[in-house]
Image (cartoon, grey):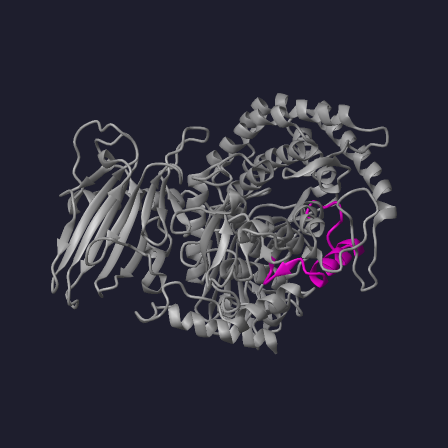
Amino acid sequence: MRLVLAAVAFLAVAAATAHGPAASAPCTPGASWSYAEGVGAATRSGRDVWGEQLLAARNGPTFEAAHRFLAPILYATQRGRLPLTPSHVYYLPLAYPTAVGAPASFALHVADGSEIFTRRVTGPHVSVYVGRTGRERYGSCLARTQTATLVDGYLPIMLTSYTDAGGVRYTQESFASRLDGARSIVSFVHLTVDASDAKRGAVVRFVTSTPARLVVVRRGPMHVAAGTSADIYMGWLHKLPLLHPIKVNETTYERARSSLITYWQNRLAQGTQLLVPEERVQDAEKSILIQQLVQGWRYSAGNPYEELSYAEAMDTVQVMAEYGYRDDAEGILRMALQRLPLRFSSWRAGDRLLASAVYYDLFKDRAYLGKETPALGSAVAKLDANQLPDGRLPPEPLSSDVPGAVDGVPAQVVAWQGLLAISRVWSVTGHRDLAARARSVALRLEHGLDQALAPLVRRPGDGSLFVPSTLTPTAPYPRITATRDGSYWNLVMPYAFASGFFPPGSADAKGILAYLLAHGSRMLGVSRADAHIAYGRYIVGDGLAEVYSLAPARFIADNDLPDQLTLSLYGMLAIGMTQGTYVSGEAISALPVGTAYYRTMYMPPNLGANSSFLETLRLLLVHERRGRFGAPRGLDLAFSTPRLWLADGDTLGVQNAPTSFGTLTYSVTRDGKTLTADLRLPRTPTPTRLRFRLPAGLHVAYVALGRRRLPFDHATGTVTLRGAHGHLTLRVQLR
């Protein structure tokens, strides 16, 4: 009952702030005691109690149900327990992407509309001040602020609004684009000042660290009289000097805006198109793809985390390749391979081999493989040379921020996975000796790891299976994230679980899943972690790590738990990222920080969190079945889609999706009691399977291919298309 009361208390606060509280409300909204108590009860639970509520609903998880549990994310922190920006509010990194490896040019637009930074949060900046005397910082009273949303729901054009203490209303639109005469991108701002109903006028001031970077029609304070309104245009130069003088006015603003929209629409059209009948999900996918194309290989942007984080970069390679962004994936691969010898580890080597194999599987790029094979072969040779007599690999740190080498399980399993993957690719591309060597190293490693793990695996007595993260005796964690060691276990072990080392559908895989779900690994389907860096003080077990939700999503998809995967999608949207702009950090608070209503994240944006969402979304629609040793075997289509995605009149599917077997396009459309499935399937070694997940109360009556009725699984609504490839049209009758 306490958890339900907490949700109601949160809703009361949210309703008061959703459209801006009254002027008499506190400028910084606070969380109620009952809300904090309810969140605390959920974090202390050994189960995903909120997720289980959603899973029990008639149509399964939905965003509307998921978002009511936790307050929105707004604040951001950095190292040293310091706020990321002066206003504590996160920023959006806006840019035209450049070639991978080229210097980046980021415009950091703070999401309350208060400030723009050049390149980094320590760089040159311009702040917006308004009010009767021009000394009230725009967005300083959050109760009177509408924080950032995006034009058309996904374009990198930021919208905010603000009402000053005197009742003057402001709306702000800003973006980063190109302008002839500027050496780099320019941040454009259009500020509308509406004093038509105010008793007093307003003054607008742009306060800069570098006046030469500011381009406005008229410098100095700009006065707007009571009873009037005005439009103000401003440009902020991110690189000096100019090539020739420029103007920022309505004409140049609209020209730059139009070119930006055209660029991103064309860029997104180059990749796979997902057909999703839920606007919020579609907007999130497009917005996050834009973030990934802007960040490239960078773990974050504009802060001290702007660096190559190997595992997350390799995950991003695979995800961007799956979404059809071949050049972007290849660019990250090339850069990562150059860095590998400098900081070699078994995990990085395995990750790099796996990402190259996935890239080849999707694009069959022999030219790329030929150029990279010498370096990849060197990585295999080093793994071979490092093998211990029993086949295992030597100790190394469990994580980059956990000092000291350990006899770790995930690093060795990832190396095993990468060796087998590259062996398969080399065996079909004329590199038989390299293929045999990689496979031999993998099989010796598998044998040694099996022998070492067997006596260390534990069964807590609840039907679950605990596999330790190191090859030392470890007791199962009663609540995984209650300790720092358990929290790190929750971040790294899913990489091992998703590798295929524990075969999908096996008793071991089922036991591992039972342990994860019964011992607090997830909250609303999002991976949990201690997240103390998001709080500014040490709190164990009270936060989220969307960045590490990718491997669990793969493990769940491999073991065909569709509602759990749907829960993960909506959990990420609801509590793992900002509302309306889809930004996430490395760690995210769950409990209130102090008495603050809004939640906090650590050094956003985050490459890995973005990849986690994109991978989860794709897995709902396209999942590749894999056989022994990870070899691609077949396709499962629409296996985990939310049930309400096949409401009457809706369509779901994908267009031009790369798979290991070739390009895939399919759609499923519902018209009343009839579904039409239009498929263009590549040839696969095993049958393609298509599932129809329907709203509650509906069932499949029959599936027909032409005049022939096909057998199907009545319990799941799954049809198996044996020997099918090319263009097929299925008709499905519902009852």
Vertical placement of residue 41 versus 323, above or below? below
Q: Nearer the viewer, residue 117 or 556?
A: 117
* Count of labels in the image: 0
Q: Quadrant of residue 718?
A: bottom right
Quadrant including the N terminus: bottom right
> Is 509 colored magenta in this rendering?
yes
Q: Quadrant of residue 107?
A: top left
Q: Nearer the viewer, residue 190 or 721?
A: 190
Report the span colored magenta.
498-526
> Is 318 colored magenta in this rendering?
no
* Residue 723 place in picture, x, y as percent: 64, 51
Q: Residue at x 47, y 39 (%)?
A: 325
Quadrant including the C terminus: bottom right
Is residue 237 toward the left or the right of residue 108 in the image? left
Vertical placement of residue 122 versus 506, above or below? above
Q: Nearer the viewer, residue 132 or 559?
A: 132
Q: Residue at x 60, y 66 (%)?
A: 40
Vertical placement of residue 694 versus 548, above or below? below
Q: Residue at x 52, y 70 (%)?
A: 65
Visible residue check, residue 727: no
Is residue 257 toward the left or the right of residue 529 in the image? left
Is residue 604 toward the left or the right of residue 622 in the image? left
* Residue 681 place in picture, x, y as percent: 55, 49
Visible residue check, residue 625: yes
Is residue 300 toward the left or the right of residue 348 in the image? left
* Residue 255 place in picture, x, y as percent: 21, 43
Q: Residue at x 73, y 23 (%)?
A: 433
